[in-house]
Amino acid sequence: MQELQSNGAPNGGGGPEKDESGPQQESQKGRAFLANLVRELFQTEHSARTHPLVEAERLGDTPPARALRAVSSHAEAVLSELPALVGERGLPVSAGGSAVGEAFSALRDHIADHLLSAEKSYRGTLLGMRHGIDLVALIQYVAAAEGDTLLAAWCARWLSERRPLVEAAAGELAWFAARPARATRAAKDSAVAHLLQGLVNGFESAAQQLRRLTALAG
């Protein structure tokens, strides 16, 4: 985890540079930028609370499922403190961001996951959790640039807690590697999911055969 300098900026340089705008305009831009990032944080944390639990339910009592539940539990705690944290700074308490997260979760559960294998669904959840880490790191930089050292420190604490959890979940990819039959099984155990996966696999096999025939003809 990066330590904060006395001005609240993370060590190691790389802080944002001011452009040629005047100080007042620059401050307004920075504030609007931070507000947009906070809205996205509500959406991302909602997904981090919801998707890992759905994934864990499918995996049962397994090491990957336990790693995912730890991330979800942390996101739950974050969502309970986030409204007060941003509200006292005049930043948006984004019900809209949470609603978008809810919509994406429903879309993925009802449509996208029918087409995914268990390991691809797991990797998709990992991708979303890693996005959250990048987002909070960016919020930390912007908060420091805006002089909000308390928000920057909160981000540093979030990163120190979430990163190890996500890294632990990523380490559980080895569990899938040792179980190829389970890894390639449909993420959702339903007739529709198995039918769609069969169709996708059939199309992929046909495409491979067509490429072989094309190569022979050439």
Image (cartoon, rainbow, N blue to C red):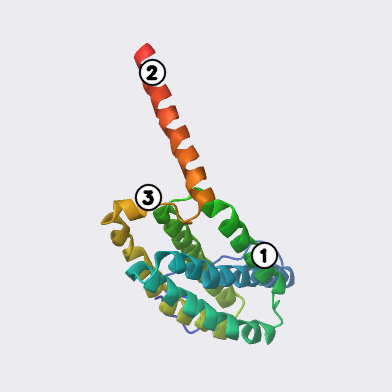
Residue to which mark 2 is pinned = 213
Residue at horizontal 46 percent and vertical 41 percent from the top: 198
Q: Which structural element holds mark 2?
A: helix
Residue at horizontal 34 percent and vertical 69 percent from the top: 62
Near-viewer residue (21 or 164): 164
Q: Residues within 10 Å of mark 3 (few under 14, many from 20)?
A: some
Spot occupied by residue 109 in the image (x, y as percentages of width and height): 56, 59
Q: Quadrant of the C terminus?
A: top left
Distance from the alpha carbon under mark 2 to that under mark 3: 27 Å
The answer, for residue 63, to whether it is visible in the render is: yes
Q: Amino acid at mark 3?
A: Thr
Residue 81 falls left or right of residue 183: right
Q: Amino acid at mark 2?
A: Leu
Q: Which structural element holds mark 1?
A: helix
Q: Is residue 151 above or below residue 190?
A: below
Distance from the alpha carbon under mark 1 to that under mark 2: 46 Å
Label 2 vs 3, first from the N-terminus: 3
Distance from the alpha carbon under mark 3 to that under mark 1: 30 Å
Residue at horizontal 58 percent and vertical 80 percent from the top: 79
Residue at horizontal 59 percent and vertical 56 percent from the top: 110
Label 1 vs 2, first from the N-terminus: 1
Q: Quadrant of the N terminus?
A: bottom left
Q: Nearer the viewer, mark 3 or mark 1?
A: 3
Label 3 vs 1, first from the N-terminus: 1
Q: Is residue 15 above or below residue 79?
A: above
Residue 42 falls left or right of residue 197: right
Residue to which mark 3 is pinned = 184
Q: Residue furthest left?
A: 178
Dividing the picture into quarters, in which one does residue 159 lie? Answer: bottom left
Spot occupied by residue 2 in the image (x, y as percentages of width and height): 41, 75
Spot occupied by residue 133 in the image (x, y as percentages of width and height): 48, 68
Residue to which mark 1 is pinned = 100
